[in-house]
Image (cartoon, rainbow, N blue to C red):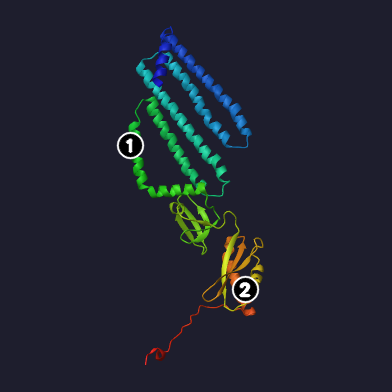
Amino acid sequence: MNDTISLYLNNALSTSAGSFESRLAMALLILFSSIVIAAIVDLIFKRVFMYYASKTRFEFDDLIVAALRKPLYLTVIFIGMFFSLHYTNLTTKYIYILDRTGLTALFVVWIVALLGINKIVFEKVFPHLTRKTETQIDDELLPLLKGIANVSIVFIGILAILNLIWNINVTPLFASAGIAGLAVAFAAQDSIAQLFGGISIYFDQPFKRGDRIELESGEVGIVHEVGIRTTRIMNLYNNMIIIPNSIIANSKVINYTSPEGNMVVKMTMGVAYGSDVEKVRRVLYDIIRKIDIILKDPEPSVRLSEYGDSSINFALYMWIKNPSDKIKLIDMVNSRIAEEFEKEGIEIPFPTRTLFIRNQEETTPN
């Protein structure tokens, strides 16, 4: 593409009459005109675009306009240099070197400008969006994504310079980069699995910070932080459990807080055979209705669940607003049951076994 433009300009400009001095004077005039146009463009950016950008309540638009101002100024000057250079009708060898050197410099200018815009976007725009979410992982992903974007801009820019400007075949570079990428992927497969596990947790959102969850291993705790590589859970003993995201993303997780914070607590209470069933039911109802942390809606209930080996078993269903009150509730209910059952004379049985021993003399034949 660059060769076609240069050939066209050379053919078009070489047909124009005049001595070398007149061509040089015209080239200087073109260069001077480009500087004037660049100054006008810079003035328009300063007086118009930056003025209106300053009127908005956002800061990032001012920074982006300022970041584009200098590259556009240099681009206009480069175009003038490009045309003035071809107007002098220098030898093809010098034209080739100067053209590509100038284009390379212009590409570098725009690569630096894009890196600056990328920095503005990741430091001024995205943080405002991630602060509105309840998860921490998106905040932690921003530096990683910013680095990936920077590397991509530089990589694509270098490939464009080599391929489009200097006509260098970049296919071998892609092949070597693919081999190096495979080697890095095999060496860091655990870290990559944890990274993608964290990303899947972020987008799927099976839980968020502050949720009470139960892991497939049976551990129960409150989600303290969801990071890029690991998830931290504070268990009931105030210990921090750190689990790799690759494991937790592929495990069954029970979320007691979602879709709502209310949680049902089930307790089983056994009484001795021969107890008055209705009396036991009434006493249990009186106990759970007087505990403040038990919600009135949904209403708590008492059910005769089964006849066990040594006891008649009742199931108590109680709803609480905060899952963290579960242990406190169990303690309160058990304490009240021990107190009220003693007053009412209700027996709490313990497992018993009855043994029948046959007399050996009765089983011995005469």
Do the residues under discs 2 and 1 have CB atoms within 8 angstroms? no
Instruction: Give the distance between the C-alpha atoms of the residues marked 2 and 1, in whole angstroms.
Output: 74 Å
Q: Specify whether 279 is left or right of 157.
A: right
Q: Specify whether 166 is left or right of 34.
A: left
| Residue closest to the eye, 2 or 38 | 2
Graded by Cα atoms within 10 Å as few (under 14), some (14 to 19) or many (20 or more), the crowding at tag 2 reads some
Task: Please report the residue visible at 52 percent of the width from the left and 40 percent of the height from the top.
Answer: 122
Task: Please report the residue visible at 33 percent of the width from the left and 35 percent of the height from the top.
Answer: 175
Q: Which residue is mark 2?
A: 336
The image quarter in which residue 48 lies: top right
Percent x, y for residue 271? 58, 76
Q: Specify whether 256 is left or right of 2.
A: right
The secondary structure type at the circle numbered 1 is helix
Q: Which amino acid type is shown beneath numbered disc 1?
A: Ser
Residue 178 vs 247, above or below: the answer is above
Residue 196 vs 366, above or below: the answer is above
Q: Earlier in the sequence, mark 2 or mark 1?
A: 1
Q: Quadrant of the C terminus?
A: bottom left
Q: Which mark is residue 144?
A: none
The secondary structure type at the circle numbered 2 is helix
Q: Quadrant of the N terminus?
A: top left
| Residue closest to the eye, 147 or 228 | 228
| Residue closest to the eye, 198 or 57 | 198
Q: Which residue is mark 1?
A: 176
Q: Which amino acid type is shown beneath numbered disc 2?
A: Arg
Q: Specify whether 362 is left or right of 49.
A: left
Residue 242 vs 274, above or below: the answer is above
Percent x, y for residue 55? 63, 33
